[in-house]
Image (cartoon, helix red, strand yellow):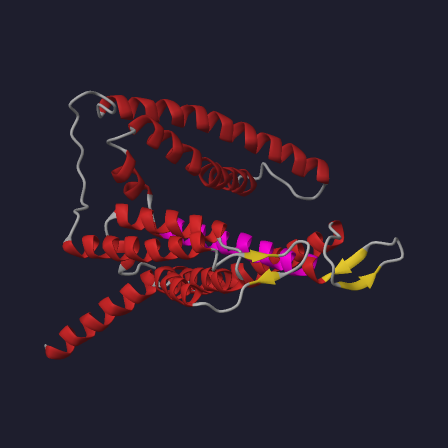
């Protein structure tokens, strides 16, 4: 599923997700973390639909709980003791809070990268970096494609062997033999595929001086407007971070400053920034509905 924001210029898309990831790592304040978490989840649902809900409830939510449990089982810092184990270690409020914050941060980052993978496609990545660093951009894309492409080929190879009567799941030894044979076939395919890719790139003149590049992306006025809004919001957010209004401390005691004008201003800016793709998509949808109603 695509949205209006994903149809904007690749540079705008890339800057947004880089800034979203950096801000998500910088802020551990509950307000900012909650905004990032909820905005990333909403955008992932917008892009991926029900599959994003399934991923969140069956993979990411358990991950959040696991990180929280792991933190207070391994660490015992903090002054607010909730329970003392027989071993003498304390269960403290600070370890639970920091574990939940860390887990939420990890899940928010994963959700943002899920959105990134849907919006910043391979052709967009190559448009941004292909002319400036063609070899590095190509290498990064090949590495990112390695796992899903080879996993798919392995599944197809195993299925082909099974349909041909060459694979059996009756005994564990048969599964191992069939797996080894399938991996061997995938390795052979990978070597042939690499040769074909190299020949194709050479025939197309990749990396040669003076080679032209076609691109269907143009920097429109709407892209300039979005970029200006993102930079302005980022300046306010960074000012909030520098002022210390958005800081939070969880060791040895939970310390979160009270509400201040700078905290309110920076959190509103962060809210608008994180929901900017959804806001822009809603704006374009409303514009389309008005135009459609006039026809």
Whether 116 is among the magenta residues is yes
Camera sees residue 55: yes
Q: Is residue 258 left or right of residue 205?
A: right
Residue drawn at 39 percent across, 25 percent down: 194
Is 191 placed above or below 176 here?
above
- Residue 167 on image: x %, y %: 60, 38
Q: Nearer the viewer, residue 197 or 146?
A: 146
Answer with the quarter of the image where residue 200 lies. top left
Furthest residue to the left?
A: 295
How far from the left and from the top, in percent, is residue 177?
65, 32
Task: Report whether 45 appears left or right of 2.
Answer: right
Please identify the quadrant where the N terminus is shown.
Answer: bottom left
Please provide percent x and percent y for residue 83.
Answer: 81, 63
Residue 153, horizontal then vertical, whole percent: 47, 38
Q: In the image, which residues are magenta? A: 95-118
**Residue drawn at the location 45% of the way across and 35% of the way down:** 146
Residue at the spot 16% in from the left edge and 76% down from the top edge: 290
Image quadrant holding the C terminus, namely: bottom left
Specify whether 139 is left or right of 180: left
Image point (48%, 59%), residue name: 246
Query: Is residue 59 visible in the rendered structure shown here?
Result: no
Q: Is residue 197 left or right of residue 72?
A: left
Front-most of 37 and 266?
266
Q: Main secondary structure of the magenta part?
A: helix
Relative depth, front residue between 101 and 214: 101
């Amino acid at each position: 599923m695509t949205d209006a924001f994903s149809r904007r210029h690749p540079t705008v898309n890339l800057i947004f997700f880089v800034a979203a990831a950096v801000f998500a790592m910088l802020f551990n304040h509950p307000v900012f973390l909650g905004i990032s978490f909820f905005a990333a989840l909403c955008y992932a649902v917008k892009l991926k639909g029900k599959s994003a809900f399934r991923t969140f409830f069956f993979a990411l939510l358990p991950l959040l709980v696991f990180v929280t449990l792991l933190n207070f089982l391994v660490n015992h810092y903090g002054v607010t003791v909730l329970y003392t184990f027989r071993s003498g270690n304390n269960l403290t409020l600070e370890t639970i809070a920091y574990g939940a914050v860390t887990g939420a941060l990890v899940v928010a980052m994963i959700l943002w990268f899920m959105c990134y993978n849907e919006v910043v496609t391979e052709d967009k990545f190559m448009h941004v970096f292909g002319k400036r660093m063609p070899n590095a951009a190509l290498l990064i894309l090949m590495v990112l494609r390695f796992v899903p492409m080879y996993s798919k080929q392995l599944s197809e190879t195993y299925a082909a062997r099974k349909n041909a009567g060459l694979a059996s799941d009756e005994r564990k030894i048969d599964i191992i033999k069939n797996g080894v044979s399938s991996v061997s076939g995938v390795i052979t395919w990978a070597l042939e595929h690499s040769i074909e890719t190299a020949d194709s790139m050479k025939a197309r003149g990749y990396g040669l001086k003076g080679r032209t590049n076609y691109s269907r992306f143009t920097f429109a006025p709407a892209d300039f407007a979005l970029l200006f809004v993102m930079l302005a919001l980022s300046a306010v957010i960074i000012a909030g971070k520098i002022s210390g209004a958005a800081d939070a401390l969880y060791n040895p005691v939970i310390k979160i400053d009270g509400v201040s004008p700078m905290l309110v201003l920076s959190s509103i800016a962060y809210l608008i920034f994180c929901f900017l793709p959804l806001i822009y998509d809603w704006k374009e949808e409303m514009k389309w509905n008005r135009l459609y109603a006039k026809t």
